[in-house]
């Protein structure tokens, strides 16, 4: 697997700007002081949006909002794809399969077909669009890419994830959970190449894992109405990571190792990372790249694991260290890869 390429839209929005925006548009909210206190503790200091903050929350017809959102997803995804191809000196004609994931912006055909045309990929390239997965999309798309390479030895897969999560930033949503997502989510695109031959230093995937907590459908969900997409969650969502730790460790320990040497963990929020740290009993420094990504860029949805992986490349573990890449999302679902760090 190559080093990922992660791209950001032009508008960086600081925490203080969002707090001020919440004060302005929800001045009469009966829980305003509590909300400001809670969202100020998410740990997110900045994030990037595809539009300026004063435009993001403005109401608009769903058709217009969706069209703009999908265009943003395509732009971010295409830019990330072009970047990773250039950085790895790979011509588009070498790509045998494209795997994509996005949950914001509904369109048929989707990001996969857009990339095939925009990048001039071969007409016989296989494409695997992985949708409706939210924040788990990046990790599960990687699992599908690994599956393809195993089924087609020698093939090269282009994996692209893009999200314009700012589309769910709407002033009509005033629950405590919605206010947290206003602070938490950021927009981005990410891409990585996956093959069975070395692509420079990076992860060599040994095994993959998927898991869905029973009866957890309502914990996180995307809702659509006349204004567009909204992201909702329940208080039950807070215990999801804690319930996942035991089966996660059981799967990892089948490798004959006790605990991972490194983590590439989804930046779902401070509760997710704290519960993972406590549940597996790891040192905080093993999740530092995830904490840094959360602080500097927010929750990037499916792109988050690629951003954390990029940070791991900048500060790599020891050769042959064994670790886990894991993404989490609505369902409540998880997708993970057990991998070792190769130097080339």
Image (spheres, rainbow, N blue to C red):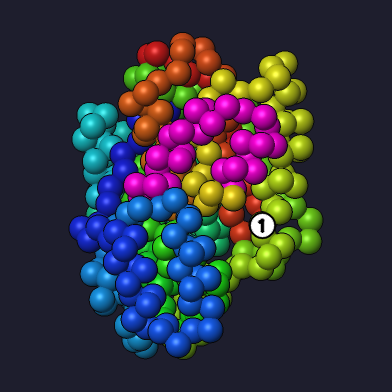
Quadrant of res 282: top right
Residue stretch rendered in magenta on the structure: 272-297
The residue carrying pointer 1 sits among few (fewer than 14), some (14 to 19) or many (20 or more) residues within 10 Å by Cα, namely some
Taking the image as shown, residue 158 lies to the left or right of residue 84, namely right
Quadrant of res 284: top right
Number of callouts: 1
In the foreground, 182 or 142: 182
Task: Please say if 286 is above or below 248.
Answer: above
Q: Which residue is mark 1?
A: 238
In the foreground, 49 or 205: 49
Whether residue 11 is visible to the viewer of this picture, yes or no, is yes
- Residue under the image location 59 percent in, 54 percent down: 329
Residue 316: x and y, percent? 40, 21
- Residue under the image location 54 percent in, 78 percent down: 31
- Residue under the image location 52 percent in, 58 percent down: 134
Residue 195: x and y, percent? 44, 28
| Residue 26 painted magenta | no
Q: Main secondary structure of the magenta part?
A: helix
């Amino acid at each position: 697997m190559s080093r990922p390429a992660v791209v950001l839209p032009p508008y960086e929005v600081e925490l203080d700007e969002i707090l001020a925006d919440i004060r302005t548009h929800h001045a009469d909210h009966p829980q305003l002081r509590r909300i400001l206190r809670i969202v100020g503790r998410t740990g997110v200091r900045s994030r990037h949006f595809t539009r300026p903050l004063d435009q993001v929350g403005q109401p608009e017809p769903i058709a217009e909002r969706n069209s703009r959102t999908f265009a943003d997803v395509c732009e971010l995804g295409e830019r990330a794809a072009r970047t990773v191809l250039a950085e790895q000196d790979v011509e588009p004609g070498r790509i045998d399969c494209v795997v994509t994931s996005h949950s914001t912006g509904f369109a048929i055909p989707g990001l996969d077909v857009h990339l095939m045309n925009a990048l001039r990929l071969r007409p016989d390239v296989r494409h695997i669009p992985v949708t409706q997965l939210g924040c788990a999309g990046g990790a599960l798309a990687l699992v599908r890419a690994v599956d393809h390479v195993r089924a087609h030895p020698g093939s090269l897969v282009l994996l692209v994830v893009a999200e314009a999560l700012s589309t769910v930033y709407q002033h009509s949503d005033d629950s405590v959970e919605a206010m947290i997502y206003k602070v938490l989510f950021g927009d981005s695109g990410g891409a990585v190449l996956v093959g069975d031959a070395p692509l420079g230093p990076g992860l060599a995937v040994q095994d993959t894992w998927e898991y869905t907590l029973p009866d957890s459908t309502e914990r996180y969900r995307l809702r659509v109405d006349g204004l567009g997409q909204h992201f909702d969650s329940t208080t039950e969502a807070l215990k999801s990571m804690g319930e996942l730790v035991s089966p996660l460790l059981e799967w990892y320990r089948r490798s004959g190792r006790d605990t991972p040497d490194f983590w590439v963990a989804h930046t779902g929020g401070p509760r997710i990372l704290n519960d993972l740290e406590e549940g597996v009993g790891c040192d905080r420094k093993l999740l530092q790249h995830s904490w840094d990504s959360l602080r500097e860029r927010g929750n990037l949805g499916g792109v988050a694991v690629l951003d954390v992986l990029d940070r791991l490349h900048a500060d790599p573990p020891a050769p042959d260290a064994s670790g886990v890449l894991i993404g989490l999302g609505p369902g409540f679902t998880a997708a993970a890869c057990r991998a070792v760090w190769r130097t080339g």
